[in-house]
Image (cartoon, grey):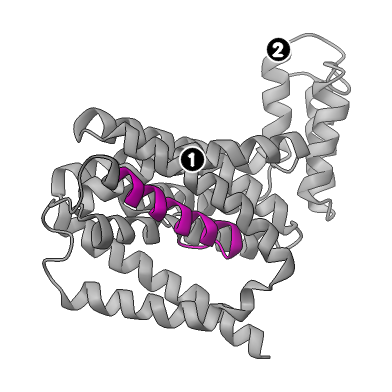
Amino acid sequence: MGSGVFLAVTLLIFLQRHGCSIEYIDFFIVNHMIIPYKPLCFSTVTLSAVFQIILLYFAAMLDWWIYVIICFGALFAGFIDAVVGGGGLIQVPMLLILFPELTHVQVIATNRFASVAGTAVAAIQYIRMVGVDLSVAVVTGITAAIASFSGTFVMELIKPEVFKPLLLVVVIVLAVYTFIKKDFGATHEVKYTGKTFLFVCGAIGAVIGFYNGFIGPGTGSLLVFAFVSVAGMNFLHASSTSKIINAIADAASLIGFLLNGAVLFKLALPMMACNMLGGYIGSKAAILKGNVFIRYVFLLVISLLIIRLGRDVIMGWK
């Protein structure tokens, strides 16, 4: 392989083993290897330049078992998110636990980069196999995006922690209602037609979008619940429509993260691949198994949301 490859690999492993952060290693790779396009210490051209970069990049990885956890977590998150939303309830805590040195923005940006690809894969499957009213999805997506943008400004004025205890109670009620009412979301009986239906869905998008910008976790699952309870969709159509809306909103927000350089590609790229696979499997499972299966997964995600909000409320009391 050549002494140059060995020296470069050894150097990057030394940096990682001696406490260098992920951000520094990313900076090191980009500025000293990729941008100059001259990998360090390569005395002979025994490999192509592209393969050298890939080799060096993966040499700087953290312990392999951490990446195994990340990939399995992203796969499961992609599966859950494709079925009923809520993948961020798995990926974000996973990143926070494994990489406590990362900033909140880096965690959210890396999660968003990974999840947007999985959401897009699931959305394509739903469009092809279920049949989604794209006009409803687009209108709801636009109102959700505008309201989400507004919610971020309100967050600067009013702390979200003030409303989390009330939200926790509401989510618990939703979970109990869904658990008790066995036929909830089993039939597709839309309650409105024409422009009225578009208006109702747009209003749902505005409310849930505002929640997304103001508080955040569990947005996809709450959107599914709103489509089922307010609009009269069944779980399959509600989940299908929400995936398109999520794909639009996530792609829009990802642009800002990319421009700010907040995405850590060393983590985001393997997570993205696993999230896409999970999104494909999850959407297939939801389509094949139908509303009963989606309802069970919805209850699981709502339970995770209750745990997350409960933790936030308890931490806020300390």
Nearest the viewer among 297 and 136 is 136
Quarter in which the N terminus is drawn: top right
Which one is in front, 33 or 280?
A: 280
- The quarter holding residue 268 reads top right
| Mark identifier at residue 272 | none
Residue 300 visible in the snapshot = yes
Under mark 2, the amino acid is: Leu
Q: Residue sitting at 29 percent across and 68 percent down?
A: 299
Residue furthest front as drawn? 195
Residues at badges 2 and 1 in contact (C-beta under 8 Å)?
no
Q: Name the side, left or right, on which 66 lies relative to 143.
A: right
* Disc 1 packing (10 Å; few <14; some 14–19; many ≥20): some
* SS label for mark 2: loop
Report the residue marked by disc 1: 142
Amino acid type, callout 1: Ile
Please name the predominant secondary structure of the magenta segment in the image.
Answer: helix
| Direction from residue 199 to residue 259 in the image, left or right | right
Q: Is residue 14 visible?
A: no
Looking at the rendered structure, the secondary structure element under dot 1 is helix
Q: Residue at x 45, y 42 (%)?
A: 141
- The magenta stretch spans which residues? 198-218
Q: What is the x, y in percent for residue 167?
A: 47, 77
Residue hosting label 2: 47
Magenta segment includes 200: yes
